[in-house]
Amino acid sequence: MTSDQVRPAPREPQHADDSPPSVEQTLLGQLVGYALRRAQLANFRQVNAAIGELGIRPAQFSVLVMAEAYPGITQSELAQCLNVDPPRMVNLLHNLEEHGLALRVRNKVDRRSHGIFLTKRGEAELQSLKARVHEAEDTHLGELSSQERDTLLQLLQRLF
Amino acid sequence: MTSDQVRPAPREPQHADDSPPSVEQTLLGQLVGYALRRAQLANFRQVNAAIGELGIRPAQFSVLVMAEAYPGITQSELAQCLNVDPPRMVNLLHNLEEHGLALRVRNKVDRRSHGIFLTKRGEAELQSLKARVHEAEDTHLGELSSQERDTLLQLLQRLF
DNA sequence: TATTGTTATACTCTATAACTATA
DNA sequence: TATAGTTATAGAGTATAACAATA
Protein backbone atom coordinates (compact mmCIF):
# COMPACT_ATOMS: atom_id res chain seq x y z
CA MET A 1 0.00 0.00 0.00
CA THR A 2 2.98 2.34 0.30
CA SER A 3 4.07 4.43 -2.64
CA ASP A 4 7.05 2.21 -3.37
CA GLN A 5 4.67 -0.31 -4.88
CA VAL A 6 3.97 2.03 -7.77
CA ARG A 7 6.45 2.60 -10.52
CA PRO A 8 4.97 4.80 -13.23
CA ALA A 9 5.80 3.97 -16.83
CA PRO A 10 9.08 5.74 -17.58
CA ARG A 11 8.55 5.43 -21.32
CA GLU A 12 6.27 3.70 -23.75
CA PRO A 13 6.81 0.54 -25.84
CA GLN A 14 10.59 0.83 -25.70
CA HIS A 15 11.46 -1.52 -28.57
CA ALA A 16 9.92 0.41 -31.44
CA ASP A 17 12.50 -0.55 -34.03
CA ASP A 18 14.59 -2.49 -31.51
CA SER A 19 14.97 -6.20 -31.94
CA PRO A 20 11.88 -7.95 -30.54
CA PRO A 21 12.12 -9.13 -26.94
CA SER A 22 13.88 -12.47 -26.67
CA VAL A 23 14.73 -14.68 -23.72
CA GLU A 24 18.18 -15.29 -25.22
CA GLN A 25 19.23 -11.76 -24.30
CA THR A 26 18.34 -12.28 -20.65
CA LEU A 27 19.33 -14.37 -17.67
CA LEU A 28 16.92 -17.04 -18.90
CA GLY A 29 19.14 -17.68 -21.89
CA GLN A 30 21.98 -18.59 -19.54
CA LEU A 31 20.05 -20.92 -17.25
CA VAL A 32 20.49 -24.64 -17.79
CA GLY A 33 17.11 -25.12 -16.08
CA TYR A 34 15.32 -22.98 -18.63
CA ALA A 35 17.08 -24.73 -21.52
CA LEU A 36 16.11 -28.08 -19.99
CA ARG A 37 12.49 -27.04 -19.88
CA ARG A 38 12.45 -25.85 -23.46
CA ALA A 39 14.26 -28.94 -24.75
CA GLN A 40 11.90 -31.18 -22.83
CA LEU A 41 8.82 -29.42 -24.20
CA ALA A 42 10.21 -29.69 -27.73
CA ASN A 43 10.78 -33.40 -27.15
CA PHE A 44 7.22 -33.90 -25.88
CA ARG A 45 5.86 -32.18 -28.96
CA GLN A 46 7.81 -34.58 -31.18
CA VAL A 47 6.83 -37.65 -29.21
CA ASN A 48 3.18 -36.63 -29.01
CA ALA A 49 3.09 -36.04 -32.73
CA ALA A 50 4.53 -39.53 -33.23
CA ILE A 51 2.35 -41.55 -30.83
CA GLY A 52 -0.56 -39.22 -30.04
CA GLU A 53 -2.48 -40.29 -33.12
CA LEU A 54 -2.54 -43.80 -31.68
CA GLY A 55 -4.17 -42.38 -28.55
CA ILE A 56 -1.08 -42.95 -26.42
CA ARG A 57 0.69 -40.34 -24.27
CA PRO A 58 4.29 -40.47 -23.05
CA ALA A 59 3.29 -41.62 -19.55
CA GLN A 60 1.27 -44.50 -20.96
CA PHE A 61 4.14 -45.46 -23.23
CA SER A 62 6.47 -45.67 -20.24
CA VAL A 63 4.02 -48.00 -18.47
CA LEU A 64 3.87 -50.26 -21.52
CA VAL A 65 7.65 -50.43 -21.70
CA MET A 66 7.92 -51.38 -18.03
CA ALA A 67 5.16 -53.98 -18.29
CA GLU A 68 6.93 -55.58 -21.23
CA ALA A 69 10.28 -55.62 -19.43
CA TYR A 70 8.79 -56.82 -16.12
CA PRO A 71 5.65 -58.84 -16.82
CA GLY A 72 3.53 -59.04 -13.67
CA ILE A 73 4.96 -55.83 -12.22
CA THR A 74 2.53 -54.42 -9.65
CA GLN A 75 0.86 -51.02 -9.70
CA SER A 76 2.80 -49.82 -6.70
CA GLU A 77 6.08 -50.91 -8.26
CA LEU A 78 5.16 -49.05 -11.44
CA ALA A 79 4.20 -45.98 -9.45
CA GLN A 80 7.49 -46.06 -7.58
CA CYS A 81 9.91 -46.63 -10.45
CA LEU A 82 8.16 -44.23 -12.83
CA ASN A 83 7.78 -41.53 -10.15
CA VAL A 84 4.04 -41.35 -10.55
CA ASP A 85 1.74 -41.44 -7.58
CA PRO A 86 -0.65 -44.34 -7.12
CA PRO A 87 -3.89 -42.44 -7.88
CA ARG A 88 -2.56 -41.40 -11.25
CA MET A 89 -1.42 -44.95 -11.99
CA VAL A 90 -5.04 -46.06 -11.55
CA ASN A 91 -6.13 -43.81 -14.42
CA LEU A 92 -3.19 -44.72 -16.63
CA LEU A 93 -4.02 -48.41 -16.28
CA HIS A 94 -7.75 -47.89 -16.80
CA ASN A 95 -6.84 -46.20 -20.01
CA LEU A 96 -4.50 -48.93 -21.19
CA GLU A 97 -7.12 -51.56 -20.36
CA GLU A 98 -9.74 -49.61 -22.32
CA HIS A 99 -7.36 -49.59 -25.28
CA GLY A 100 -7.01 -53.35 -24.87
CA LEU A 101 -3.24 -53.02 -24.47
CA ALA A 102 -2.73 -54.15 -20.86
CA LEU A 103 -4.41 -56.25 -18.20
CA ARG A 104 -4.58 -56.23 -14.43
CA VAL A 105 -4.34 -59.78 -13.10
CA ARG A 106 -5.13 -60.31 -9.44
CA ASN A 107 -2.31 -62.03 -7.61
CA LYS A 108 -3.56 -65.34 -6.23
CA VAL A 109 -1.18 -65.34 -3.29
CA ASP A 110 -1.63 -61.74 -2.15
CA ARG A 111 -5.08 -60.83 -3.36
CA ARG A 112 -4.53 -57.13 -2.68
CA SER A 113 -2.07 -56.67 -5.52
CA HIS A 114 -2.50 -56.75 -9.28
CA GLY A 115 0.16 -57.87 -11.71
CA ILE A 116 0.22 -55.91 -14.95
CA PHE A 117 0.64 -57.75 -18.25
CA LEU A 118 0.51 -56.69 -21.86
CA THR A 119 -2.13 -58.23 -24.07
CA LYS A 120 -1.04 -59.77 -27.36
CA ARG A 121 -2.30 -56.62 -28.97
CA GLY A 122 -0.39 -54.52 -26.45
CA GLU A 123 2.81 -56.34 -27.30
CA ALA A 124 2.33 -55.76 -31.00
CA GLU A 125 1.29 -52.13 -30.56
CA LEU A 126 4.29 -51.47 -28.34
CA GLN A 127 6.69 -52.51 -31.10
CA SER A 128 5.16 -49.92 -33.37
CA LEU A 129 5.17 -47.30 -30.60
CA LYS A 130 8.85 -47.93 -29.88
CA ALA A 131 9.71 -47.46 -33.54
CA ARG A 132 7.79 -44.20 -33.59
CA VAL A 133 9.42 -42.94 -30.41
CA HIS A 134 12.87 -43.70 -31.79
CA GLU A 135 11.95 -41.84 -34.94
CA ALA A 136 10.71 -38.86 -32.92
CA GLU A 137 13.93 -38.90 -30.90
CA ASP A 138 16.00 -38.96 -34.09
CA THR A 139 14.05 -36.03 -35.45
CA HIS A 140 14.44 -34.09 -32.23
CA LEU A 141 18.16 -34.83 -31.95
CA GLY A 142 18.76 -34.45 -35.67
CA GLU A 143 21.29 -31.69 -35.16
CA LEU A 144 23.51 -33.78 -32.92
CA SER A 145 26.16 -36.29 -33.94
CA SER A 146 25.88 -39.67 -32.30
CA GLN A 147 28.81 -38.78 -30.09
CA GLU A 148 27.16 -35.54 -28.98
CA ARG A 149 24.01 -37.52 -28.32
CA ASP A 150 25.89 -39.88 -26.01
CA THR A 151 27.51 -36.96 -24.23
CA LEU A 152 24.13 -35.34 -23.71
CA LEU A 153 22.59 -38.52 -22.34
CA GLN A 154 25.46 -39.05 -19.93
CA LEU A 155 25.40 -35.46 -18.69
CA LEU A 156 21.63 -35.62 -18.17
CA GLN A 157 21.88 -38.89 -16.28
CA ARG A 158 24.12 -37.22 -13.75
CA LEU A 159 21.36 -34.76 -12.89
CA PHE A 160 19.10 -37.25 -11.12
CA MET B 1 -13.22 -58.63 -27.95
CA THR B 2 -11.27 -61.45 -29.61
CA SER B 3 -9.25 -63.89 -27.58
CA ASP B 4 -5.97 -62.24 -28.57
CA GLN B 5 -6.75 -59.45 -26.12
CA VAL B 6 -6.29 -61.80 -23.22
CA ARG B 7 -2.89 -62.94 -22.12
CA PRO B 8 -3.14 -65.00 -18.96
CA ALA B 9 -0.47 -64.52 -16.33
CA PRO B 10 2.38 -66.85 -17.22
CA ARG B 11 3.85 -66.61 -13.74
CA GLU B 12 3.45 -64.60 -10.59
CA PRO B 13 5.52 -61.70 -9.17
CA GLN B 14 8.57 -62.62 -11.26
CA HIS B 15 11.20 -60.63 -9.36
CA ALA B 16 11.01 -62.40 -6.03
CA ASP B 17 14.66 -62.01 -5.16
CA ASP B 18 15.49 -60.34 -8.48
CA SER B 19 16.64 -56.75 -8.48
CA PRO B 20 13.64 -54.44 -8.18
CA PRO B 21 12.22 -53.15 -11.47
CA SER B 22 14.13 -50.16 -12.73
CA VAL B 23 13.75 -47.98 -15.79
CA GLU B 24 17.53 -48.07 -16.30
CA GLN B 25 17.32 -51.66 -17.45
CA THR B 26 14.81 -50.83 -20.16
CA LEU B 27 14.49 -48.80 -23.31
CA LEU B 28 13.54 -45.80 -21.16
CA GLY B 29 17.07 -45.71 -19.74
CA GLN B 30 18.43 -45.19 -23.26
CA LEU B 31 16.03 -42.45 -24.36
CA VAL B 32 17.33 -38.90 -24.29
CA GLY B 33 13.71 -37.76 -24.07
CA TYR B 34 13.11 -39.67 -20.86
CA ALA B 35 16.37 -38.39 -19.37
CA LEU B 36 15.37 -34.85 -20.34
CA ARG B 37 12.07 -35.24 -18.55
CA ARG B 38 13.66 -36.59 -15.38
CA ALA B 39 16.36 -33.93 -15.35
CA GLN B 40 13.80 -31.21 -15.91
CA LEU B 41 11.59 -32.48 -13.08
CA ALA B 42 14.61 -32.62 -10.77
CA ASN B 43 15.44 -29.05 -11.73
CA PHE B 44 11.88 -27.87 -11.05
CA ARG B 45 12.00 -29.47 -7.62
CA GLN B 46 15.19 -27.56 -6.82
CA VAL B 47 13.90 -24.27 -8.16
CA ASN B 48 10.55 -24.63 -6.43
CA ALA B 49 12.25 -25.38 -3.16
CA ALA B 50 14.32 -22.22 -3.62
CA ILE B 51 11.63 -19.73 -4.69
CA GLY B 52 8.37 -21.47 -3.78
CA GLU B 53 8.51 -20.25 -0.21
CA LEU B 54 8.33 -16.71 -1.58
CA GLY B 55 5.12 -17.68 -3.38
CA ILE B 56 6.75 -17.56 -6.81
CA ARG B 57 6.70 -20.32 -9.42
CA PRO B 58 9.13 -20.79 -12.29
CA ALA B 59 6.73 -19.32 -14.87
CA GLN B 60 6.23 -16.19 -12.76
CA PHE B 61 9.97 -15.85 -12.32
CA SER B 62 10.45 -15.91 -16.09
CA VAL B 63 7.90 -13.11 -16.48
CA LEU B 64 9.70 -11.00 -13.89
CA VAL B 65 13.03 -11.50 -15.67
CA MET B 66 11.55 -10.43 -19.00
CA ALA B 67 9.78 -7.42 -17.50
CA GLU B 68 13.05 -6.28 -15.98
CA ALA B 69 14.97 -6.74 -19.22
CA TYR B 70 12.24 -5.16 -21.36
CA PRO B 71 10.28 -2.66 -19.28
CA GLY B 72 6.92 -1.96 -20.91
CA ILE B 73 6.85 -5.29 -22.74
CA THR B 74 3.26 -6.14 -23.64
CA GLN B 75 1.30 -9.20 -22.57
CA SER B 76 1.20 -10.59 -26.08
CA GLU B 77 4.96 -10.15 -26.46
CA LEU B 78 5.47 -11.96 -23.17
CA ALA B 79 3.12 -14.72 -24.23
CA GLN B 80 4.97 -15.15 -27.50
CA CYS B 81 8.55 -15.11 -26.32
CA LEU B 82 7.87 -17.28 -23.25
CA ASN B 83 5.75 -19.77 -25.22
CA VAL B 84 2.77 -19.30 -22.95
CA ASP B 85 -0.67 -18.70 -24.35
CA PRO B 86 -2.42 -15.39 -23.68
CA PRO B 87 -5.08 -16.73 -21.29
CA ARG B 88 -2.44 -18.14 -19.01
CA MET B 89 -0.48 -14.89 -19.13
CA VAL B 90 -3.56 -13.14 -17.73
CA ASN B 91 -3.43 -15.28 -14.60
CA LEU B 92 0.33 -15.01 -14.23
CA LEU B 93 0.09 -11.21 -14.30
CA HIS B 94 -2.91 -11.10 -11.94
CA ASN B 95 -0.80 -13.07 -9.56
CA LEU B 96 2.26 -10.84 -9.87
CA GLU B 97 0.07 -7.76 -9.38
CA GLU B 98 -1.50 -9.32 -6.28
CA HIS B 99 2.00 -9.90 -4.93
CA GLY B 100 2.75 -6.24 -5.65
CA LEU B 101 5.67 -7.19 -7.90
CA ALA B 102 4.46 -6.01 -11.30
CA LEU B 103 2.06 -3.53 -12.85
CA ARG B 104 -0.02 -3.33 -16.00
CA VAL B 105 0.12 0.17 -17.45
CA ARG B 106 -2.32 1.01 -20.20
CA ASN B 107 -0.60 2.29 -23.33
CA LYS B 108 -1.81 5.82 -24.03
CA VAL B 109 -1.33 5.54 -27.77
CA ASP B 110 -2.90 2.14 -28.32
CA ARG B 111 -5.33 1.75 -25.46
CA ARG B 112 -5.82 -1.94 -26.17
CA SER B 113 -2.37 -2.93 -24.97
CA HIS B 114 -0.77 -2.96 -21.55
CA GLY B 115 2.88 -2.42 -20.84
CA ILE B 116 4.26 -4.51 -18.00
CA PHE B 117 6.58 -2.93 -15.46
CA LEU B 118 8.14 -4.12 -12.23
CA THR B 119 7.29 -2.25 -9.07
CA LYS B 120 10.13 -1.08 -6.85
CA ARG B 121 9.33 -4.03 -4.67
CA GLY B 122 9.33 -6.31 -7.71
CA GLU B 123 12.78 -5.11 -8.70
CA ALA B 124 14.14 -5.77 -5.22
CA GLU B 125 12.42 -9.14 -4.91
CA LEU B 126 13.71 -10.20 -8.31
CA GLN B 127 17.31 -9.71 -7.20
CA SER B 128 16.72 -12.10 -4.34
CA LEU B 129 14.89 -14.55 -6.60
CA LYS B 130 17.74 -14.53 -9.12
CA ALA B 131 20.22 -15.33 -6.38
CA ARG B 132 18.07 -18.22 -5.19
CA VAL B 133 17.61 -19.56 -8.71
CA HIS B 134 21.35 -19.49 -9.31
CA GLU B 135 21.84 -21.31 -6.04
CA ALA B 136 19.26 -23.93 -7.02
CA GLU B 137 20.96 -24.36 -10.37
CA ASP B 138 24.33 -24.81 -8.69
CA THR B 139 22.86 -27.43 -6.40
CA HIS B 140 21.22 -29.25 -9.27
CA LEU B 141 24.35 -29.15 -11.43
CA GLY B 142 26.66 -29.79 -8.51
CA GLU B 143 28.07 -32.94 -10.08
CA LEU B 144 29.18 -31.16 -13.24
CA SER B 145 32.37 -29.22 -13.83
CA SER B 146 31.89 -25.76 -15.25
CA GLN B 147 33.10 -27.04 -18.60
CA GLU B 148 30.57 -29.87 -18.57
CA ARG B 149 27.92 -27.35 -17.66
CA ASP B 150 28.74 -25.25 -20.71
CA THR B 151 28.70 -28.33 -22.91
CA LEU B 152 25.30 -29.31 -21.56
CA LEU B 153 23.86 -25.84 -22.12
CA GLN B 154 25.15 -25.71 -25.67
CA LEU B 155 23.85 -29.16 -26.53
CA LEU B 156 20.43 -28.32 -25.08
CA GLN B 157 20.25 -25.06 -26.99
CA ARG B 158 20.57 -26.97 -30.24
CA LEU B 159 17.37 -28.87 -29.46
CA PHE B 160 15.00 -25.94 -29.97
C1' DT C 1 -1.99 -52.52 12.13
C1' DA C 2 -0.03 -52.13 7.58
C1' DT C 3 -0.42 -52.42 2.59
C1' DT C 4 -2.67 -52.33 -2.30
C1' DG C 5 -5.47 -50.21 -4.82
C1' DT C 6 -9.18 -46.98 -5.17
C1' DT C 7 -12.18 -42.76 -4.83
C1' DA C 8 -12.70 -38.06 -4.09
C1' DT C 9 -10.90 -33.64 -4.28
C1' DA C 10 -8.22 -29.77 -5.55
C1' DC C 11 -4.83 -27.01 -7.72
C1' DT C 12 -1.84 -26.09 -11.62
C1' DC C 13 -0.87 -26.29 -16.42
C1' DT C 14 -2.32 -26.36 -21.11
C1' DA C 15 -5.38 -25.42 -24.88
C1' DT C 16 -9.47 -23.64 -27.27
C1' DA C 17 -13.33 -20.86 -28.24
C1' DA C 18 -15.85 -16.84 -27.62
C1' DC C 19 -16.30 -12.29 -25.89
C1' DT C 20 -14.94 -6.83 -25.06
C1' DA C 21 -12.82 -2.83 -26.16
C1' DT C 22 -10.26 -0.73 -28.97
C1' DA C 23 -8.09 0.19 -33.50
C1' DT D 1 -11.96 -6.28 -40.07
C1' DA D 2 -8.22 -7.15 -37.05
C1' DT D 3 -5.76 -7.06 -32.57
C1' DA D 4 -4.97 -7.03 -27.16
C1' DG D 5 -6.67 -8.66 -23.52
C1' DT D 6 -10.08 -11.27 -21.08
C1' DT D 7 -13.48 -14.87 -19.64
C1' DA D 8 -15.15 -19.42 -19.61
C1' DT D 9 -14.34 -24.05 -20.04
C1' DA D 10 -12.24 -28.44 -20.31
C1' DG D 11 -8.54 -31.81 -20.20
C1' DA D 12 -4.17 -33.59 -18.40
C1' DG D 13 -0.81 -33.69 -14.72
C1' DT D 14 0.21 -33.55 -9.79
C1' DA D 15 -0.71 -34.10 -4.91
C1' DT D 16 -3.28 -35.25 -0.66
C1' DA D 17 -6.56 -37.40 2.29
C1' DA D 18 -9.64 -40.99 3.19
C1' DC D 19 -11.62 -45.43 2.25
C1' DA D 20 -12.26 -50.78 1.13
C1' DA D 21 -10.32 -55.10 0.78
C1' DT D 22 -6.84 -57.89 2.19
C1' DA D 23 -2.88 -59.27 4.77
Image (cartoon, coloured by chain):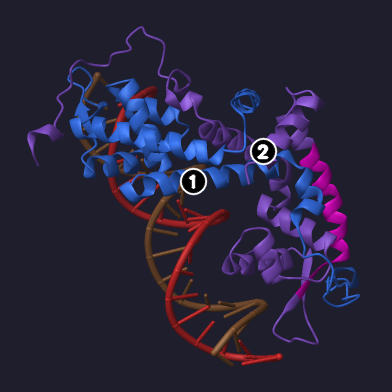
Chain colours: A purple, B blue, C brown, D red
For the point 72% across and 39% down, the residue is B32
Residue nearest the observer in this picture, A17 or B125: B125
- Whether residue B60 is visible to the viewer of this picture, yes or no, is yes
Magenta highlight range: A115-134
Q: In the picture, residue A121 is in which quadrant?
A: bottom right
Residue nearest the observer in this picture, B125 or A91: B125
Residues at circles 1 and 2 in contact by the CB criterion of under 8 Å: no
Is residue A121 one of those drawn in magenta?
yes
Specify few, some or many for label 1: CA neighbours under 10 Å numbering under 14, 14-19, or 20 or more: many
Is residue A155 one of those drawn in magenta?
no
Q: Which mark is residue A156?
A: 2
The prevailing secondary structure element of the residues shown in magenta is: helix
Please tell me whether residue B3 is drawn above or below residue A70 in the rendered image. Answer: below
Query: Do the residues at pointers 1 and 2 share their chain?
Result: no
Question: Residue A97 location, x and y as percent?
Answer: 73, 68
Three-letter residue code for mark 1: Gln
Q: Which residue is mark 1?
A: B46
Three-letter residue code for mark 2: Leu
In the drawing, does residue A108 fall left or right of residue B116? right
Q: Please state the chain letter of the residue tagged with numbered disc 2 in the rendered image.
A: A
Residue nearest the observer in this picture, B83 or C16: B83
Question: Residue D8 location, x and y as percent?
Answer: 34, 53
Q: Secondary structure at mark 1?
A: helix
For the point 62% across and 66% down, the residue is A91
Quadrant showing the C terminus of chain B: top right
Q: Secondary structure at mark 2?
A: helix
Quadrant showing the N terminus of chain B: bottom right
Question: Residue A34 location, x and y as percent?
Answer: 51, 33
Q: Residue furthest top?
A: A17
Q: CA distance from mark 1 to mark 2?
A: 15 Å
Please tell me whether residue B61 is drawn above or below residue B52 in the rendered image. Answer: above
